[in-house]
């Protein structure tokens, strides 16, 4: 079997008395989409933050490309290609779509951000940004200010920014949120192709998207993985139907 790119074992994190991550084992293999689902407050975002280095684990290990990375900070992990997809809230509204992607491309080069004027003259960064925008179908909107983009376009821009970071894996926290039917369908098609570039750990509440995309699904409840399997296995899993899918599974 192919070696996992990311491997978590016994990962644990508490906030005071609240165990948000409880001895979690999880891996991500090349080419796959591994979805992490669970009710609100189950600890999904916290798990992604632990992997990205935004939170420090209390116990357990995180191996990336076979290397233990628990001691590395967020920036060091980003340099290895382990980054969380940018959030709409982290976009710079007064800059163009292209300007935002250029920032991401520059961050990858480890420079401290510096002045945007300098960045904007860098031909290579412009080309990289345009290529990433083109991949998500936004090249026609490159010069448009972020504040003038639609919500769906902003979500695609986050992915373009992630692409510019040249990640080894994608960590995505609810990429479908706020997208209409058309936007979701477009993004599902895109993520389906994106997995061949880098595997995706996907947190998503849109179960149609999860069932369409995920090779494996892990179900997190109160910080613990209670089930793992293919879409069919999870759909028919009695404990998952009760704990999470509820009436949707009926
Ligand atoms: N920094 C923090 N300090 C204290 N408690 C926190 C902190 N971050 C998260 N929590 C708590 O940890 C629990 C898990 O939160 P988390 O955001 O990881 O859940 P989630 O599964 O992503 O939820 P949702 O689906 O609603 O986004 C929640 O009860 C939350 O209030």
Image (spheres, rainbow, N blue to C red):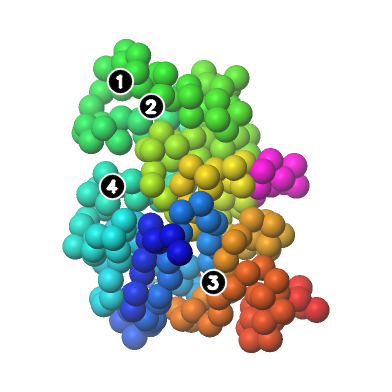
Q: Is 100 above or below relative to 14?
A: above
Residue at the disc numbered 2: 102
- Looking at the rendering, the quadrant in which ligand 1 lies is bottom left
Measuring 35% from the left and 21% from the top, which residue is drawn there?
125
Q: Give the x, y percent position of residue 15.
A: 33, 77
- Looking at the picture, tell me which residue is in the foreground, 238 or 142: 238
Mark 3 nearby-residue class (10 Å; few <14, some 14–19, many ≥20): many
Disc on the earlier residue, 2 or 1: 2
- Looking at the picture, tell me which residue is in the foreground, 40 or 77: 77
For the residues labelled 1 and 3, the Cα–Cα distance comes to: 41 Å
Q: In the image, which is nearer the foreground, mark 1 or mark 3?
A: 3
**Magenta residue span:** 178-189
Disc on the earlier residue, 3 or 4: 4
Q: Image quarter for residue 187?
A: top right
For the residues labelled 4 and 2, the Cα–Cα distance comes to: 19 Å
Which residue reaches farthest right? Answer: 250
Disc on the earlier residue, 1 or 3: 1
Q: Image quarter for residue 141?
A: top right
Q: Image quarter for residue 161?
A: top left
Mark 2–mark 1 contact, CB under 8 Å?
yes
Left-right relation of 17 to 180: left
Mark 1 nearby-residue class (10 Å; few <14, some 14–19, many ≥20): some
Ligand 1 within 8 Å of disc 3? The answer is no
Disc on the earlier residue, 4 or 1: 4
Mark 4 nearby-residue class (10 Å; few <14, some 14–19, many ≥20): some
Measuring 30% from the left and 36% from the top, which residue is drawn there?
108
Residue at the disc numbered 3: 218
Q: In the image, which is nearer the foreground, mark 4 or mark 2?
A: 4
Residue at the disc numbered 1: 119
Left-right relation of 124 to 112: right
Residue at the disc numbered 4: 80
């Amino acid at each position: 079997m192919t070696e996992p790119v990311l491997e978590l074992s016994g990962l644990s994190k508490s906030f005071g008395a609240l165990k948000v991550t409880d001895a979690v084992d999880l891996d991500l293999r090349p080419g796959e989409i591994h979805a992490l689902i669970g009710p609100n407050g189950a600890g999904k975002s916290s798990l992604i933050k632990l992997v990205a280095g935004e939170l420090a684990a209390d116990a357990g290990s995180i191996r990336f490309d076979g290397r233990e990375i628990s001691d590395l900070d967020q920036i060091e992990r980003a340099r290895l290609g382990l980054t969380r997809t940018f959030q709409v809230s982290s976009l710079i509204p007064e800059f163009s779509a292209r300007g935002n992607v250029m920032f991401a491309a520059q961050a990858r080069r480890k420079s401290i951000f510096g002045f945007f004027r300098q960045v904007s003259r860098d031909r290579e960064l412009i080309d990289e940004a345009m290529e990433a925008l083109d991949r998500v179908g936004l090249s026609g909107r490159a010069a448009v200010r972020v504040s003038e983009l639609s919500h769906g376009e902003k979500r695609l821009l986050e992915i373009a920014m992630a692409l510019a970071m040249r990640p080894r894996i994608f960590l995505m926290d609810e990429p479908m949120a706020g997208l209409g039917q058309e936007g979701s369908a477009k993004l599902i098609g895109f993520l389906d192709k994106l997995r061949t570039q880098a595997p995706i750990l996907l947190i998503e509440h849109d179960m149609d998207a999860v069932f369409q995309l995920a090779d494996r699904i892990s179900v997190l409840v109160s910080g613990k993985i209670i089930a793992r399997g293919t879409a069919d296995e999870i759909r028919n899993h009695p404990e998952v139907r009760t704990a999470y899918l509820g009436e949707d599974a009926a």
